[in-house]
Image (spheres, rainbow, N blue to C red):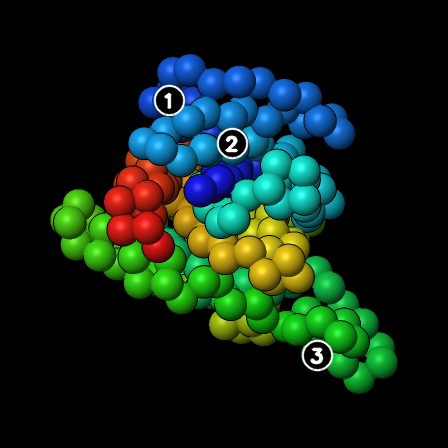
Amino acid sequence: MRIAIMGAMPEEIAPILKQLGEYKTTSYAGNTYYEATYKGAVLVIAYSKIGKVFSTLTATTLIEHFGVQKLLFSGVAGAISESLKVGDLLVATKLSQHDLDITAFGHPYGYVPEGAVYIEADKELITLSKQIALQMDKNIQEGIIATGDQFVANEERKNWIGATFGADALEMEGGSVAVVCDAFKVPFFILRAISDAADMDASFSFDVFLEASAKESAAFVMNMVDAIIEKNV
Ligand code: OS5
């Protein structure tokens, strides 16, 4: 089995590379891909760089060039829901693009013809994540993630995204990764640990908590990998 683990920033994949220790490095289309054999499976790990375009390129490359059969995203996010605090883990049930706007033609926000406002993550992987959370005695929440090419540090924008998409958290890559995986029929799972509240203090909070939150997310995703391999999901 070939499993992708993807992040957007170096910090988001660093804990995974550290745990693996040994890997083969390949440069492809401006990114570095790390391949490791792990418990009989092959893991292909990469950070895309920030935003929807780079994450689209990386997700496509992981599927089309590296032949991964599942894609797990590990990273951090800004919280919208009041129930999400720094360090908390959120599993995306579905994802949307909050900056996609052809409402001038009467379409809803996040929609383009032949697309969909929301793309659902793989249900089997979400179910597995609940089992793992129980085993780890870890509290995880499920919710909607809204993605856009903006670091949101503004209460008004955050509230608009929450109200328009029913979103619990926001980030800059999940929605585009979802589009790619859905198009290629590759099951995907998006996990984010909260680094900030997408408010006026967001950039400070992000700088302080990026590393710790990325570690939380990475540790959980590695347990997901173990379970996928053991249970042959
Ligand atoms: O990847 C971007 C989205 N991430 C989730 C996130 C988020 N998204 C939107 N709004 C919020 N309030 C969010 N909170 C968490 C995090 C990341 C945000 S953009 C941060 C950019 C900071 C930076 N600038 N240079 N570097 C980091 C160094 C670097 C070097 C190589 C590759 C990437 C970054």
Circle nearer the viewer, 2 or 3: 2
SS under mark 2: strand
Extreme residue in the top direction: 22
Q: Quadrant of residue 216?
A: top left
**Label 2 crowd (10 A; few <14 / some 14-19 / many >=20):** many
Extreme residue in the bottom direction: 106
The residue that disc 3 covers is 108
Q: Quadrant of the C terminus?
A: bottom left
Of the residues shown, which amino acid type is indicated by label 3?
Pro
The x and y percentages for residue 229 are: 32, 43
The residue that disc 1 covers is 20
Q: Quadrant of the N terminus?
A: top left
**Label 1 crowd (10 A; few <14 / some 14-19 / many >=20):** some
Q: Earlier in the sequence, mark 1 or mark 3?
A: 1
The residue that disc 2 covers is 45
Q: Is residue 112 above or below residue 197?
A: below
Residue at 51 percent across and 31 percent down: it is 45
| Label 1–label 2 contact, CB within 8 A | yes
| Image position of 211 (left or right of 30) | left
Of the residues shown, which amino acid type is indicated by label 1?
Leu
Judge whether residue 40 can be spotted in this image.
Answer: yes
Q: CA distance from mark 1 to mark 3?
A: 44 Å
The x and y percentages for residue 73 are: 48, 45
